Amino acid sequence: MNVELFDYQPIVDREPITWPNGARVAFYVGLNIEHFHVDKPSTSIWASTNTLVPDPLNYGWRDYGMRVGIWRVIETLDRYGIRASTLLNSEVAEHYPQVIEAGRARNWAWLAHGQTNSRLHANLEIDEEREILADIVTTIEKASGQRPQGWMGPGLTETMNTPRLLAELGLSYVLDWTNDDQPYRLNVPGLLSVPYTLEVNDLLMFVTKGFTGPEVLQIIKDQFDQLYADSASSGRVMALALHPFVIGQPFRARYLDEALAYIAGHEGVWLTTSDEIAEHYRRTTA
């Protein structure tokens, strides 16, 4: 079965992309703000207990992010004037209103990220999915004061109908297809793909692969350096994917600060949001 959502277009065959003020790299932080159910297995640091109900070990590890880690991350982002591109489970609006308020005060971008990361966005009939997506978008709009323009499914999940249903709701881009360094148009009218990352992602680097803080810092620098070099001929996007229960741990916080200092210290970097990247691309390219 072929992918019908997008066409193959090698990056070397495209018209150059330009970013505002001649920037070479558009950089954004994809901040995963998620709610987990205490009675369902989910993202775990220790697999041996993740089927227990309750599972204090893994649930508590995740819950640290919303109680403590997010506030440490916010302080770091504020130091560099970086507005988060918030990948928001709609259930967060009910359970963590203080986090929503902090994001509203900072004019974060708000992307729909499913209802909860305890349930993947999969195996849905089209009418059920249409209803669920409408509820997600409406809930986030009511809580944040901003109608989401972007989507990333929990676990980067979609159904075959998701892109079309998102377009019906007025969303303009998705992050789920992590296959490019530039935005591109999808074969759904009005819908773009904007780059996200699985590789430069704190959850996969620290937890799945077991990298240390210095190793992660070097990976982030190497990613930026290569994209900066590539952008001599056409603009690139760099995403940094963060989870407060991972990067918000005290012993890791300094490495986020050092990474952002490195990136922000370069000329020709547009510190922006995924919303602004999508809007600029749509407005300035054919």
Image: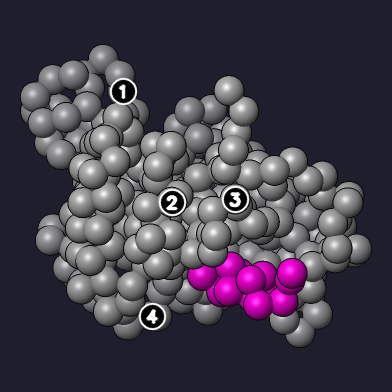
Q: Residues within 10 Å of mark 2 (few under 14, many from 20)?
A: some
Nearer the observer: mark 2 or 4; the answer is 2
Nearer the observer: mark 3 or 1; the answer is 3
Camera-side residue of 71 and 273: 273
First in residue order: circle 3 vs circle 2: 2
User: Left or right: where does residue 223 sit relative to residue 129?
Assistant: right
Q: Which mark is residue 164?
A: 2
First in residue order: circle 2 vs circle 4: 4
Badge 2 vs badge 4, beta-carbon distance below 8 Å: no
Q: Which mark is residue 46?
A: 1
Badge 3 vs badge 1, beta-carbon distance below 8 Å: no
Q: Which residues are magenta?
A: 268-286
First in residue order: circle 1 vs circle 2: 1
Q: Which image quadrant for residue 139?
A: bottom left
First in residue order: circle 4 vs circle 1: 1
Nearer the observer: mark 3 or 4; the answer is 3
Residue at point 64% right, 71% down?
Answer: 282
